[in-house]
Amino acid sequence: WKEEMMLVQLEMDWTCNFFLWKATQWGDRMRESEEKRLPGHACYSGRQSQMYLLLAQNAEAAFQDM
């Protein structure tokens, strides 16, 4: 069980890191879109970035109890 628990904890970390990575990616796209004066693209990218940030926060909160 110790090995299984260790793997699950690593998978939880990977999940949070993935969501944070995607939030950063979309944030970078938002800034690029703003520089190119593409407000629609910037808005969409900003919403995607926020969504992934919230997913990361929710995952971290859910995984803290384990």
Image (cartoon, rainbow, N blue to C red):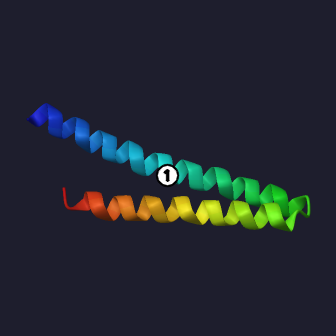
Quarter-wise, where is residue 35 in the image?
A: bottom right
Q: Is residue 28 left or right of residue 12?
A: right
Amino acid carrying mark 1 in the image:
Phe
Q: Residue furthest right?
A: 37
Label 1: how many Cα within 10 Å (few below 14, some 14–19, many 20+): many
Kindly identify the residue that appears in the image at 52 percent across and 62 percent down: 53
Disc 1 target residue: 19
Q: Is 28 above or below relative to 54?
A: above
Q: Is 23 above or below relative to 11?
A: below
Q: Is residue 9 left or right of residue 33?
A: left
Q: Is residue 15 left or right of residue 61?
A: right
| SS assignment at label 1 | helix
Q: Is residue 7 left or right of residue 23?
A: left
- x then y, percent, for residue 41: 80, 60
Quarter-wise, where is residue 23 in the image?
A: bottom right
Kindly identify the residue that appears in the image at 29 percent across and 62 percent down: 62
- x then y, percent, for residue 7: 24, 35
- x then y, percent, for residue 42: 78, 63
Q: Is 35 above or below relative to 8?
A: below
Kindly identify the residue that appears in the image at 91 percent across and 64 percent down: 37
The mark total stands at 1
Q: Is 66 above or below relative to 1?
A: below
Q: Residue furthest left?
A: 1
* Quadrant housing the C terminus: bottom left
* Quadrant housing the N terminus: top left
Kindly identify the residue that appears in the image at 62 percent across and 60 percent down: 49
